[in-house]
Amino acid sequence: MEAATTSNYSPEEIKQIRFEYKTLLKSVDMKNDTDRKNIRAAFELAVDAHHKQRRKSGEPYVLHPIEVARICVQEIGLGPTAVICAFLHDVVEDTDVTLEDLEEQFGSKVTMIVDGLTKLDKAFDIKSPQAENFKKILQTLTKDVRVVLIKMADRLHNMRTLGSMPKHKQLKIASETAFIYAPLAHRLGLYNIKTEYQDICMKITDYENYKMIANKLAATKVQRNAYIDSFIDPIKRELDETGLKYRILGRPKSISSIWKKIQTKKVPFEQIYDLFAVRIILDVSAKMEKRKSWLVYSVVTDYYKPIPERLKDWISTPKSNGYESLHTTVVGPEGRFVEVQVRSERMDEVAERGFAAHWKYKKMYSENVFDYWINSIRELLEAPSTDALEFVNDFKANLFSEEVYVYTPKGDMRILPKGATPLDFAFGIHTQIGSHCTSAKVNGRMVPLGYKLENGDKIYLTTSANQKPNMAWLDMVITSKAKSNIRTAIRKERNKAGELGKEALMRKFNSIKARWEEDNLNIIVKVFNISSHLELYYEISQDKSWLSNLKKFEVKNGKLIFIKKVEAPVNRPRISIPKHRKKAVDQPKLLINGENGEKYKYSLSNCCNPVQGDLVFAFNAVGAGVKIHRTICPNATSMMANYGHRIMKAEWASLNNIDFVADLTITGTDGRGVVQQLTNVITDLGIDMRSITMTGIEGIYEGKISVFVNNTNTLNNLIITLKQEKGVNSVIRTN
């Protein structure tokens, strides 16, 4: 660290920076002196370039790239080139260093990776900066996967240090992470990173439930550890007799996965029995992995009864991201379910470090399990569409977690996402086969093109040169490749038809003596709320009578002028709200970006029904005003990830006596008087009910109740009281 640079850091900071750097070097596998020299040069460049910058926490900014490099090495398993790029990943974006400077000092490979990690210029007029930047990263993925892996490390450190950021920025970053980065981490086999992403996201967006589960896990830690020890003891005794080299790990499932199970099963924490996961890792040769794993399975199931439908053999058929493991769930002591995972040390490294570890063992495979996926991303990037939002949503559809294994007529296996159809299969074989597919047979039986494929299906396709994709096909496919190719084909057809519509409109302009110019076309699309000129041409081509709509304009000096009609006012009866209650139609007091919310003419969204006291944010819905959403709204993740620039900070200014609508789902044991029992509780608390519906099947009921409440305190008190009622199993607030 040069003297000129070190003068910008305190002695304590210089000591800390040097310590972190030297600690990192101990874990980097450097092949030669060139690696050592370039790492040192990149470190010194980062220290110098970022010397004026501080993180929100106040610490020197350069500690961030050092930590990103550490994550790359220790948690993902990357090497010296990744360390160099991690040190430099922000210098082009945040400092005066240019890509040309990096090219001269470190060469083209490092420059290409850093360029992929550099955000687009904010001055660009783009619909969604987040989507454009993510597309830019993915364009480099097909050249060098380290771009995405370093980005994952960068995002992980940012998530770990989000506490120093304002709440609304935490929400935006967390939503973007949940929307794209967590599924991508799963797809790359980075399961630990994916889990940490999801837990931190939940801690930010749904802190109350996160804290509830964390506290209950902490309270039961001693009993849980004792249970796992008692579960493992007989297995260890038997394994020791076999002479196998192994290690056993026992740990609870993540907070976010437990919460997901609580929501899907609609049961309280105490009724989630498969909180435990035990992993048995074998130190065996590659040749003996499969045989010894099944031996361990036999040992486990000799002691504990297995649940057959929970057996997953990802050793015989690995997941498409390279994951291999043998999973089973057994009934342990006290009737509790325990998931047991059996794998080799090699499999464990691939499972823990994903893509990076897979490349280390690539020579052991006849084919690269990632090639198919990366090729599909390449095809998606090469599609004619330039809409980054469309690209990101198609790409996300490709990050499937569950898979089906299907076969061609010749017996070649294809891996598709669960829910895929014969059309997805057809486009996966070849774009032309998909575009001209007319029918499909599955296992010798004729099925619709939208039929959902299952494991082991053998598919036969029929094609015709006269067949063309249509809009209905988009509802029959789920893979990004199929969606992208269908949209492209439809656009080509629409553009071809649009040319005929354009010619018809030009003739009409000529007949009414209107000039063919941008302003005249713009006023037409504005008046009729049409998205673009191309869409206008297409509508004219599909409806020959459409041109009669131009009677609504008059022409003056070649210019179209819309004739506005003034309609007589209609007398409508006024709806009066009882004076004893202010309903949710009244505006609560909110601050938006620190200002009086009334300035923004906001409204509460119907998709999540915010209640006074909920954590909320404001979303500028162009053309529809400002909408207030809960941070755990079903649409929040997508909105914040794709349109982060439209998100505004929102907070309740004061608690007012205004009623909000809240919806609850209640399950329990069915019996006489259930409806009266629940309505009595609600009435006794002084809460008014909006609606109630009940359905009962085989002794179990599910109720949907809508109530008026003033704030979250009232709502939470109602939920707690209902849960205490006899026969009530669960009470969940729903959107």
Image (cartoon, grey):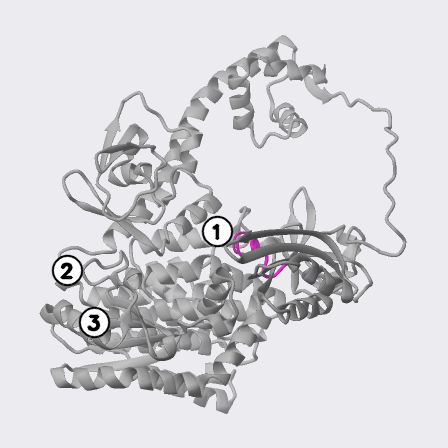
Q: Position of residue 631 (x, y in %)?
A: 60, 61
Residue 514, placed above or below residue 627: above
Please state which of residues 179 and 299 is positioned toward the viewer in this rendering: 299
Tell me where residue 573 sits by quadrant. top right
Residue 242 vs residue 211: left or right?
left
Q: Earlier in the sequence, mark 2 or mark 3?
A: 3
Q: CA distance from mark 1 to mark 2?
A: 35 Å
Q: Earlier in the sequence, mark 3 or mark 1?
A: 1
Tell me where residue 472 sits by quadrant. top left
Q: Are marks 3 and 1 in contact (CB under 8 Å)?
A: no
The magenta stretch spans residue 79: no
Q: CA distance from mark 2 to mark 3?
A: 24 Å
Please state which of residues 525 and 439 is positioned toward the viewer in this rendering: 439
Find disc 2 in the rendering and name its residue. 365
For label 3, the crowd category at 10 Å Cα-Cα, with few meaning under 14, some 14 to 19 and many 20 or more, is some
Q: Amino acid at mark 2?
A: Tyr
Q: CA distance from mark 3 to mark 1?
A: 45 Å
Find disc 3 in the rendering and name its residue. 297
Residue 622 vs residue 714: left or right?
left
Q: Position of residue 611 (x, y in %)?
A: 70, 60
Q: Amino acid at mark 1?
A: Ala
Residue visible at 13% across and 76% down?
284
For label 1, the crowd category at 10 Å Cα-Cα, with few meaning under 14, some 14 to 19 and many 20 or more, is many
Q: Amino acid at mark 3?
A: Tyr
